[in-house]
Amino acid sequence: MVGVGVPPLLVACLFGDTQLAEILIAAGATNKAAAEMTTPLVLCSMRNAASTASRLLANGADVHAVSG
């Protein structure tokens, strides 16, 4: 999954890297899905990355956002 065209926020969520997710959110990253990929919030849920998911939610992640 990690490769060319994968949004950095998805990578942070894949690895549960809350600090990187916070940096990316501060830089303008969003919870939107990339083409044919899941949303960062869904990926956090799938990976049991509760801390990172919590940060996304605290920064306005749309729980109703759908995959591309």
Image (cartoon, rainbow, N blue to C red):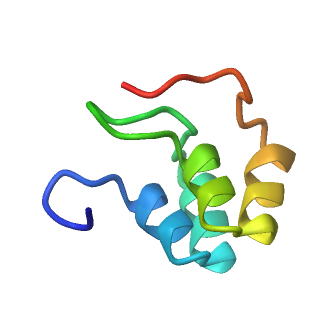
In the displayed structure image, the side of residue 10 where residue 27 appears, left or right: right
Depicted 40 relative to depicted 23: above or below: above
**Residue 24: x and y, percent?**
54, 60
Instruction: Give the residue drawn at x 78%, y 36%.
Output: 60
Quarter of the view holding residue 38: top left
In the displayed structure image, the side of residue 57 where residue 44 appears, left or right: left
Quarter of the view holding residue 37: top left
In the displayed structure image, the side of residue 41 where residue 12 appears, left or right: left
If the image is split into quadrants, where does the C terminus sit? top left
In the displayed structure image, the side of residue 61 where residue 57 appears, left or right: right
Please count the marks in the image: 0
Judging depth in this view, the residue of 47 and 22 nearest the camera is 47
Judging depth in this view, the residue of 53 and 25 nearest the camera is 53
**Residue 58: x and y, percent?**
86, 48
Judging depth in this view, the residue of 67 and 58 nearest the camera is 67
Instruction: Give the residue drawn at x 34%, y 52%.
Output: 7
Instruction: Give the residue drawn at x 55%, y 64%.
Output: 13
**Residue 45: x and y, percent?**
68, 55
**Residue 34: x and y, percent?**
34, 36
If the image is split into quadrants, where does the N terminus sit? bottom left
Depicted 25 relative to depicted 32: above or below: below
